[in-house]
Structure formats: C-alpha cells, structure tokens
Image: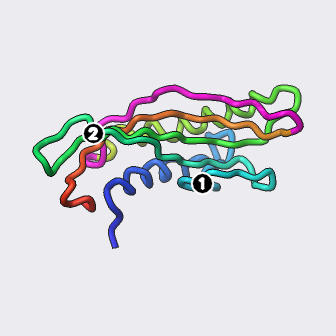
Amino acid sequence: MADPKSLRVIKTLQSALEQIQGEGFNTDAGLRITRGRKRISKDETFPLLVIHEGDEEVIKAVGQQQVHNRLNITIEGWCEADPLNPLDDAHFLLADIKQSLFPALESRCNPGLFTKVDYLGRVIDPPEDGSRICSVSVLLAIDWAERLTEPMN
C-alpha cells in the first residue's frame, strides 16, 4: 500500500537524515532515527534523532478540494556531551543534521512533494545537572500541496 503524501514528506526527511554516518559526518546519528517519539531514556544508544510533526496550517485554498499547507517540523537530536565542553558535541550533531537535510530538501530534488522548506532556526539544550546528554533541535516549515479528496496523491 502506498503512503499518504503527508507521510511521504516526513519519510523524505528521514531518508535525508539516514545519510548521517560514515565519511564526511561527525556522528552516526543516521543509524538511530524515529518519527514522533516523545520520551528518551538515559539508557539509549546515542546519538539519536527524532522527527516531530508540529502544527500544520492552510496557507492557501484552491477551491474546496486542494490546499497548500505549511507543516512545522522539529528535528531533535540527542548526544552524549563532553563533560568540560558539553555544547561542542551538540554543535557537531547540529552540523550533521544541516549537512544531510538541506541539499536533499531542495524542491527540485523532490518535484511534486513539497514546494518550499524554510529553516526557522535551532535550539541547543545543555545537559541537565548530573547528566551527560544534551539535545539540539532544528526547526523547519515545509510547504506542500494536498488534494483533500485524494490524500494518497
């Protein structure tokens, strides 16, 4: 069975992130990616990535059957941090996320899937007291068109 177009958009992000491993990258975070997971335990294997879907808004309606949507996405990365300079490892993971995502998300690379991807910024959270785990978040807005009567197309 084919995936709905909305899921194909998310899986395109995941496919781009799966490149994060081996030569040219600082981490192997692409080996551990999940979509929509809320809780991360201290017993995880790090680094790891989580794709979170946020709010979606209709930015334009074309008749009653087609809409242009803007979907807010957060790519969250988790890594073990150096105790002396905990944010250094977060910056390396952040660089890997950007390096894998943005070339793959040009609309010409995915014709018909989405029309625009905007980088909205990033957040780095240092480890909490007593922890060596820090997180990064990359915030995106993805514009895509959907036929409401044919969500699979």
For the record, the magenta segment spans: 111-130
Which residue is depicted at the point 17% across and 40% down?
Answer: 61
Expressed as whole percent of the image width and height from the top left, the position of residue 128 reads: 81, 34
Which residue is depicted at the point 33% across and 68% down?
Answer: 2
User: Which tag, 2 or 1, sits closer to the chain's start?
Assistant: 1
What mark, if any, has residue 37 been given in the picture? Answer: 1
Expressed as whole percent of the image width and height from the top left, the position of residue 144 reads: 29, 43
98 above or below 14? Answer: above
What mark, if any, has residue 58 been given in the picture? Answer: 2
Q: Is 133 placed left or right of 31 in the picture?
A: right
Which residue is depicted at the point 70% across and 33% down?
Answer: 90
Q: Does the magenta stretch include residue 126?
A: yes
Q: Is 140 placed left or right of 42 in the picture?
A: left
Which residue is depicted at the point 46% across and 27% down?
Answer: 120
Expressed as whole percent of the image width and height from the top left, the position of residue 21 reads: 63, 49
Mark 1 neighbour density, 10 Å: few (under 14) some (14–19) many (20 or more): few
Quadrant showing the C terminus: bottom left
Quick one: SS at disc 2?
strand
Quick one: SS at disc 1?
loop
Residue type at mark 1?
A: Arg
Mark 2 → mark 1, Cα distance in angstroms: 25 Å
Colour pattern: rainbow
| Residue placed most toward the observer, 2 or 19 | 2
What mark, if any, has residue 6 been given in the picture? Answer: none
For the image shown, how many numbered marks are present on the structure?
2
Q: Is residue 68 magenta?
A: no
Q: Is 59 placed left or right of 21 in the picture?
A: left
* Contact, mark 2 vs mark 1 (Cβ under 8 Å): no
Q: Is 57 placed left or right of 139 in the picture?
A: left
Residue type at mark 2?
A: Val
